[in-house]
Amino acid sequence: VSRAPHCTFDRVVGETVDDEDLQRWLSNYQVVAKEWHDAALAELGDVEAWRDAVAAVRRHTVAHLDRYLTQFADNVEANGGHVFFAATAEEARDHVAGIARRKGVRHIVKAKSMVTSEIGLNPALEALGAEVTETDLGEFIVQLSGEAPYHIIGPALHKRLPQIREILSEAGGVELPEDAEALAAYARAALREKFLNADMGISGVNLGVASTGTIVLVTNEGNGRMSTTLPRTHVAVMGMERLVPDWRSLDPVLTMLTRAGTGERMTTYVSAITGPKRMGDADGPEELHVVIVDNGRSRILGTKYEPVLSCIRCGCCADFCPVYRTMGGYAYESVYTGPIGAVLAPLLDGLEGREHLPFASTLCGACQAECPAGVPLADLLLELRADVTQRPTSSAAWRLGFKGFAAASKHRRLWDYALRFAGPLSPLVVRRGRLPVEPPILRAWTDSRDLPSPAPRSFRRLWARQARAAAPAPSDPTTPPGSDEREG
Ligand code: SF4
């Protein structure tokens, strides 16, 4: 594995680890998130049965995606909406930019959407001269500070109150107090102006209901409804896998999405949008466009990685991940952070330059155990690691090292002999926890850690010796056979 792609990752991780205040903040966040999450799920009773139900719905939908996509698109059009299938991020951006150009759009408000960040939509619209305003409070804060989202459902999770005060004060040109309610009130008033002036609203799609062509949005701030009903044109951008077959199957998915994501029984607003404004409707957009984005997803279909498409973007895998807590959201260099990002980013963007991400995990399995959609994250991370080591671009020394390790660990006798000699020999080559001459393949380890010497006698050898000492004398007929010392 070449060293270059790790450099940004190493730097960002180093900065996050050195920031004691941020480390405390992320740690406290995970404690609180776990309390909310556990309490909300406990009310459901048999949580595993709910998880199984969600996993079954999502697996079924992904396995029959062609059928449900066709049904969903037909129903959106029957309801008066327009559908566009975008094979790539570029096609999706161009299509939305084309609508904005045709409509002469100047002001755009956006509800929270991961897929629009994935395809880089904002810069494409700003290049047209349009003003784009993120209206989810967290997204609004990171947009003002020129940063990317830090967490799937908490974009400004890393910002503490003094920093938010500074960002909003600077944007508003006023000295705001360090008070959460006052800051929220300021943002609310600033955003209200944007909603009233907007000529286009853009949203994501939490879930699409194929049987009726309905878009379901899950929000807590009401900004989703403002963005989708006040402007004359609504554009909904959806990852192609974000469907459920019908309303019955929506039920368990919605139930688990909100409880796993925010620890709530239900978010404040659950909006179901079926087509644009109809005759007699008091509000709603005159036009509804649904852009369905592939951007690498169909490459995953039918492969060993297909289960990742069951993800419902609740973000809870990051809340339980000790690696996310330590290295933070920006180390993933992707809109998708946490364990889902470590899997999805290399799959969508390619392994090149992201081959370190599958290794950014302890494989403790906490993410997999908590995932409400049954995504086998730890298994997928292992598959990706295997793919990384098989790539022809990984260094010969790397591949040779792993081949040697695999051979030794598969043959008991070889392993025993390696350990028998490693202990007594290691003091000859390891000095103060370091090798005097470090092979490049070990440098990433020894740069920041000691290389401990193997103990002169292994635990298993000592254990065997102790067992032998405690055993009855050989003349005793009760002596068990085969109690000879085995190295281990
Ligand atoms: S992988 Fe599971 S836990 Fe992580 S965001 Fe997706 S659904 Fe949530």
Image (cartoon, grey):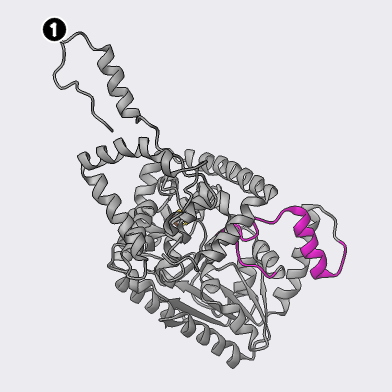
Main SS of the magenta part reads loop
At 38% across and 63% down in the image, what residue appears? 309
Choose between 315 and 457: the one closer to the eye: 457
Closer to us: 384 or 487: 487
User: Quarter-wise, where is residue 49 in the image?
Assistant: top left
Residue in the picture at 66% in, 45% down = 24
Query: Which quadrant of the picture is home to ligand 1?
Result: bottom left
Res 108 quadrant in image:
bottom right
Classify the position of the N terminus by image quarter. bottom left
Q: Is residue 173 above or below residue 56?
A: below
Q: Which residue is nearer to you in this view: 287 or 353?
A: 353
Residue 468: x and y in percent read: 25, 17
Horizontally, is 297 left or right of 140 in the view?
Answer: left
User: Could you say where residue 118 lies in the image, as x and y percent from the top left?
Assistant: 51, 72
Ligand 1 near label 1 (Cβ, under 8 Å)?
no
Direction from residue 106 to residue 459 in the image, left or right = left
Instruction: Inspect this view and state whether residue 395 appears.
Output: yes
Q: Is residue 213 visible?
A: no
Residue 302 at x, y = what percent? Answer: 27, 68
Q: What element does badge 1 sit on?
A: loop
Name the residue at the front extreme: 428
Q: Quadrant of residue 253?
A: bottom left
Tag 1 residue: 475
Q: Disc 1 residue type?
A: Ser
Quick check: 475 above or below 426? above
- Which residues are drawn in magenta? 146-175
The residue drawn where x is 25% and y is 38% is 417
Does the magenta segment cover residue 391?
A: no
